[in-house]
Image (cartoon, rainbow, N blue to C red):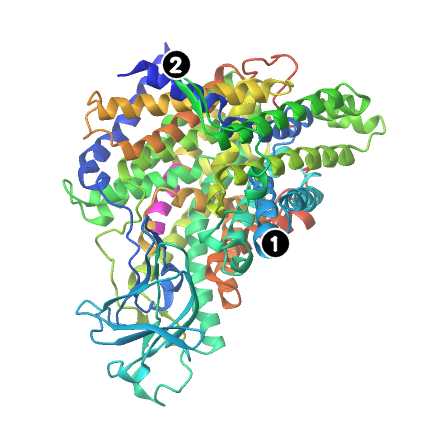
């Protein structure tokens, strides 16, 4: 067992591009769930349209990448409107089912034969983000002994963490504005907000659009990071990761999702490399667990973590137990 | 003290599900991922969508086109010439070997057309569609061994020769797909009833219900292979019991304590999602990600019932599903416990005030829902395949069914499920089969737009 290797893997996971991307998406989800009380279980749908919005124009129509990112954002706005109009008037649990279904509908659509000329169907598309890496200011990889990142990973990390922090700053400013106070009152008691003459539907919609755009940006970055895109990246489980991150960090806390993402990825990668080492080192006999099962164990661990968090500490690391009354009205 | 007993029970349940898994883990875990070799078989009516060709991304720069050609009887066709062209120029050609396999190496990636000589096909075998002897627009990516599928079909009785348009008429397909839809809908229905009853009595949307379905199917699978080797009907009955125990055990270990602490519904909902992830991936570890079939009733000749064709297996599954639905309806209408369930569904406080033991009713609902989910899983596994994701796929359709019929209404869930089954199957008349679940989910979103309480739901405020 090489504890140093596990630790450096875990640190690389906690700071790496994925953690940054998930943090950005989780900031958006936190706006939905933490501040507005929307049970959005289809956040992955926003990431999907953001990612494909970025990649398809570059590959199919030869547009520059920044136009693609804008198109991705526009797609997310359209999706939020389409999704919000039928479902935002409904009770929370209906919204949850409708959003998770919408995410799956999008995934089916993007991988279908119909969409194949644009999206590449199940095969996906690759090599569309050279425009992003052309601006890479780093000249070489970072090597701090146990911790190292490639040149491209550094650039994605910089942009990703920068975007996540900016998004969190934006949320902080908005939440302390009059608009944010109305938003939180919608979460606490929709009836009360309505009786004060606030158009609850419009506030929810604005929140859905804004958080969705953050999700779409995260989707763009996710696509740019791997330079490869296939619809099956966007399984519903990705949304559950984001929920775990938001709840772990503390819902309705500005820095909650960011801290949550760092801790989440730290735990996840350390579990991963711990298990792999234990299996290859023979600590866990291979008749019991195979290294191909590590992925499944990882998902099960996320599920268990989500359950235990919700049972014993629904406010997460930073949360305020009193502020967040988790209940359906 | 009581809580400790409960957790012990939960641990026991876990062992129940681990033991058969561990026994079968040996062969299951060593299974390699499905290979990318492509069979040019002709799908018999029902699995047309299954024959997807996965690209085999090799590291080396050389790419190729390949496939294996088999007739409708699944026998390989040897000595058939396969020609690869690009823009009308021939790039290469080869003949199929004894196993019907062929491979043409290519120097450059690009788009190719691949054709076989229809005249050289054995007697009675024709391309499935007109012009099916040529597959146009095959995209070969750098380094890929791209598979190509030729769809071949038996020349029905030789009438009219190969020029006759193959495939049944629209009306025939409509009737056939309606039957398929009713069959699929009946399976969704018996699983969705439990989901709806649980919601009605506890207001919990049980996200883990799909995993109960998977659990039932996989338990029946493990019980019906070595070392137990039980006949499938017995394995199915045991799986039904085990799933009921699982649902009941989780009620005792998780849901009842949560209700005691008066945890919020969102909190319970998220716990259910976590639970679903845990169960699904534990099952994945023991079962492997491959789709598998039960050994029995696997390959059956379908019977021609005049208007439509159905295998005896599917017919019996559908009939049992309807009988089960009838029994549930009878229980709800006529028996004491059924009336108690409806009372709790209507108003928990009133039910409790009139002397109904609400906790006991909820327990029975969980056991019933678990049992129905378990047997539904076996049916789904029989008619399609057993795989760890099956429950989640079915769960979304169950949600659609339950919302269509009205959350909390058992009859609504049945009607909604049949509607969802029909929508998903009939959509393949016009649209690709891979999108059939999408249409079912879209119907649900549409219903939410116009009538959120569903067909049979109570007119309560849902927004």
Q: Residues within 10 Å of mark 1 (few under 14, many from 20)?
A: few
- The outermost residue toward the bottom is B160
Q: Is residue B102 magenta?
A: no
Q: Is residue B425 visible?
A: yes
- The outermost residue toward the right is A197
Whether residue A74 sits left or right of residue B363 in the image: it is: right
The quarter of the image holding the N terminus of chain A is top left
- Specify the label residue A111 is tagged with: none
Residue B79 position, x and y percent, is 21, 76
- Specify the label residue A62 is tagged with: 1
Residue B105 position, x and y percent, is 30, 63
At a point 46% along the width and 57% down the height, the residue shown is B434
- The outermost residue toward the front is A139
What secondary structure do most residues of the magenta stretch adopt? helix
Residue A95 position, x and y percent, is 62, 38
Determine whether B384 is above or below A287 in the image. Answer: below
Q: CA distance from mark 1 to mark 2?
A: 63 Å
Q: Which residue is mark 2?
A: B3
Whether residue B390 sits left or right of residue A168 in the image: it is: left
Q: Chain of mark 1?
A: A
- The part of the image, by quadrant, that contains residue A328 is top right
Which range is magenta? B370-380
Residues at marks 1 and 2 touching, judged by CB atoms closer than 8 Å: no
At a point 55% along the width and 43% down the height, the residue shown is A130
């Amino acid at each position: 067992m090489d504890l140093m290797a596990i630790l450096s893997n875990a640190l690389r996971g906690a700071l790496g591009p994925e953690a940054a991307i998930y943090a950005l998406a989780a900031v958006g989800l936190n706006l939905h769930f933490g501040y507005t009380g929307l049970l959005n279980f289809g956040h992955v749908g926003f990431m999907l349209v953001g990612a494909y919005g970025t990649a398809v124009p570059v590959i199919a129509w030869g547009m520059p990448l920044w136009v693609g990112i804008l198109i991705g954002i526009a797609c997310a706005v359209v999706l939020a409107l389409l999704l919000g109009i039928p479902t935002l008037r409904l009770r929370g649990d209906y919204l949850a089912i409708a959003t998770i279904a919408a995410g799956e509908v999008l995934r089916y659509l993007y991988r279908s034969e119909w969409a194949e000329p644009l999206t590449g169907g199940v095969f996906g598309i690759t090599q569309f983000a050279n425009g992003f890496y052309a601006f890479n200011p780093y000249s070489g990889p970072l090597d701090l002994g146990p911790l190292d990142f490639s040149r491209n990973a550094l650039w994605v990390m910089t942009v990703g963490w920068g975007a996540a922090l900016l998004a969190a700053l934006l949320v902080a400013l908005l939440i302390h504005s009059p608009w944010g106070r109305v938003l939180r009152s919608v979460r606490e008691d929709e009836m009360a907000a309505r009786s004060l003459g606030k158009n609850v539907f419009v506030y929810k919609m604005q929140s859905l659009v804004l958080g969705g755009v953050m999700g779409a940006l995260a989707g763009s970055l996710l696509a740019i990071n791997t330079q490869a895109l296939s619809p099956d990246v966007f399984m519903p489980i990705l949304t559950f990761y984001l929920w775990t991150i938001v709840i772990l960090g503390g819902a309705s806390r500005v820095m909650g999702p960011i801290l949550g993402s760092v801790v989440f990825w730290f735990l996840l990668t350390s579990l991963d490399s711990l298990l792999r080492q234990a299996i290859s080192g023979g600590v866990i006999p291979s008749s019991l667990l195979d290294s191909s099962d590590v992925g499944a164990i990882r998902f099960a661990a996320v599920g268990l973590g989500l359950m235990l968090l919700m049972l014993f500490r629904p406010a997460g690391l930073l949360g305020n137990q009193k502020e967040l009354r988790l209940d359906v009205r | 003290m009581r809580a400790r007993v409960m957790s012990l029970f939960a641990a026991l349940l876990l062992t129940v599900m681990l033991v058969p898994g561990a026994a079968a883990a040996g062969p299951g875990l060593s299974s390699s991922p499905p290979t990318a070799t492509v069979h040019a078989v002709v799908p018999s009516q029902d699995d047309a969508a299954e024959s997807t060709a996965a690209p085999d991304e090799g590291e080396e720069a050389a790419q190729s086109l390949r496939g294996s050609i088999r007739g409708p009887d699944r026998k390989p066709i040897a000595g058939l010439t396969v020609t690869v062209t690009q823009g009308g120029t021939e790039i290469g050609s080869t003949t199929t070997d004894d196993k019907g396999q062929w491979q043409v190496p290519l120097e450059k990636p690009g788009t190719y057309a691949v054709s076989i000589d229809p005249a050289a096909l054995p007697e009675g075998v024709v391309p499935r569609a007109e012009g099916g002897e040529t597959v146009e627009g095959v995209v070969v990516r750098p380094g890929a061994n791209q598979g190509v599928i030729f769809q071949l079909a038996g020349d029905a009785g030789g009438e009219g020769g190969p020029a006759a348009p193959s495939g049944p008429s629209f009306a025939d397909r409509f009737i056939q797909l309606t039957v398929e839809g009713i069959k699929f809908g009946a399976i969704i229905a018996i699983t969705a009833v439990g989901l709806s009853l649980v919601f009605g009595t506890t207001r919990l949307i049980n996200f883990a219900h799909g995993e109960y379905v998977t659990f039932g199917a996989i338990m029946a699978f493990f019980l019906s292979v070595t070392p137990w080797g039980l006949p499938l009907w017995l394995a199915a009955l045991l799986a039904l019991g085990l799933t009921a125990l699982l649902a009941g055990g989780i009620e005792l270990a998780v849901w009842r304590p949560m209700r005691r602490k008066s945890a919020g519904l969102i909190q319970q909902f998220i716990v259910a999602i976590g639970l679903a992830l845990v169960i699904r991936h534990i099952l994945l570890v023991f079962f492997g990600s491959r789709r598998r079939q039960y050994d029995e009733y696997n390959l059956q000749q379908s019977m021609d019932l005049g208007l439509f064709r159905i295998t005896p297996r599917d017919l019996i599954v559908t009939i049992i599903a309807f009988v089960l639905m009838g029994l549930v309806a009878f229980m709800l209408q006529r028996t004491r416990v059924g009336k108690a369930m409806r009372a709790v569904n209507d108003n928990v406080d009133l039910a409790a005030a009139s002397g109904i033991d609400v906790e006991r009713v909820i327990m029975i609902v969980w056991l019933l829902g678990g049992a129905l989910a378990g047997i539904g899983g076996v049916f789904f596994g029989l008619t399609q395949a057993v795989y760890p994701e099956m429950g989640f796929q079915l769960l979304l359709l169950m949600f659609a069914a339950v919302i269509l019929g009205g959350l909390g209404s058992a009859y609504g869930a049945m009607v909604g499920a049949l509607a969802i089954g029909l929508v998903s199957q009939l959509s393949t008349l016009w649209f690709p089969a891979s999108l059939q679940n999408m249409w079912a989910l879209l119907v649900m979103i549409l219903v939410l737009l116009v009538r959120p309480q569903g067909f049979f739901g109570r007119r309560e405020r849902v927004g």
